[in-house]
Amino acid sequence: MRTKFSLLLIVLSFELMLFVLPDLLYAQNPTQGGKAAEDENLFIPNLDLLIQLAQESSPLLEEQSAMIAIRELQEKSIKNEWTRYLLFFSEYRYGSIMLLADGWPITSGDKSNSTWYNVGARFQLTPFDVLDLGKKRKIAKHQVEVEIAKKEELMRMIHDDVIRLWNKLVSYQEIVKINQNHIAGQEGNLSYAEQEYKAGDIPIMEYSRIMEIKTKADQEYQLAKKELRETYYLLESIVGVKLSTLKPNSK
């Protein structure tokens, strides 16, 4: 007798849960309110504009551009390094200087006080220096090319990341819309099943199955919204601006 009474209480408690749970689901319905509409209608700017903004705001690209400028200055300095081997000299003399004629001293008045200036240039560059300078120029040019290649690779990576996130954002936005419509249909099914169960037209297991389908639809919808928001915020982080500010006529 006690066992039958316990089973009866369990059945009554389960039936009470089935009647109360739909009301709780409706109260927490994710398709109601402005938040769902906001997720569904998030503004997604033009892909080319996002790529351009992401590359312009990238601190890594800015740092790499500065590195290229440094390497170019080093290359220019090495190209002008040959001037270190060019020597200029000047000489000033005043006093008694012996005059020469055909390489022989002049016998009469062979000395006079004069001022002499001597200016010249000398280029001291050995074959070893020529080879060393050539090697330094090649190394400097290669370093500039390496830094330029790094910048191009960074630009390509940013380009690919923006495209990947943009495609995910568009896809998740469509998934949210689909799940939202699916939930609306499941709400109708659950409401109809509740009426049938109360009228005794369907068994409790059928009613539970329909409720489980509705619960899974809610879970899929919430997961899709989570992925949508995460992708949206990641894209904003890469671009460097709020995507809503890129909407035409936005303030």
Image (spheres, rainbow, N blue to C red):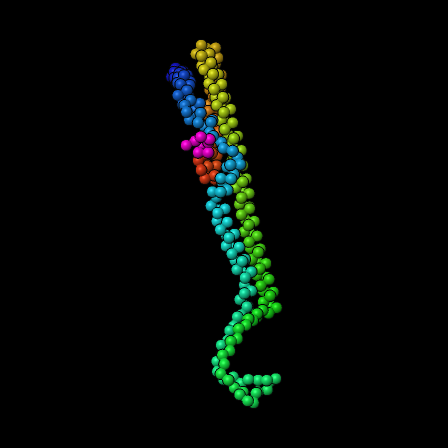
Q: Is residue 152 visible?
A: yes
Q: From the viewer's perspective, is 11 left or right of 71?
A: left
Residue 136, how many percent across, how many down? 57, 61
Residue 103: quarter of image: bottom right
Q: Nearer the viewer, residue 47 or 82?
A: 82
Q: Which residues are magenta?
A: 244-251
- The C terminus lies in quadrant: top left
Residue 106, how many percent across, how many down? 57, 87
Q: Nearer the viewer, residue 140 or 82?
A: 82
Q: Which residue is at 61% across, 65% downward?
A: 131
Q: Which residue is at 45% across, 39% downward?
A: 240
Q: Nearer the viewer, residue 123 or 18?
A: 123
Residue 10: quarter of image: top left
- The N terminus lies in quadrant: top left
Q: Tell me if residue 24 comes above or below residue 73 in the rendering.
A: above
Q: Tell me if residue 43 comes above or below residue 62 in the rendering.
A: above
Q: Is 168 part of what is drawn in magenta?
A: no
Q: Tell me if residue 192 comes above or below residue 88 in the rendering.
A: above
Residue 38, how many percent across, how many down? 44, 27
Q: Which residue is at 51% across, 36% downward?
A: 49
Q: Is residue 226 visible?
A: no
Residue 24: quarter of image: top left
* Outermost bottom residue: 107
Residue 94, how many percent across, how many down? 48, 80
Q: Main secondary structure of the magenta part?
A: loop
Q: How many marks?
A: 0
Q: Which residue is at 42% across, 26% downward?
A: 35
Q: Is 246 part of what is drawn in magenta?
A: yes
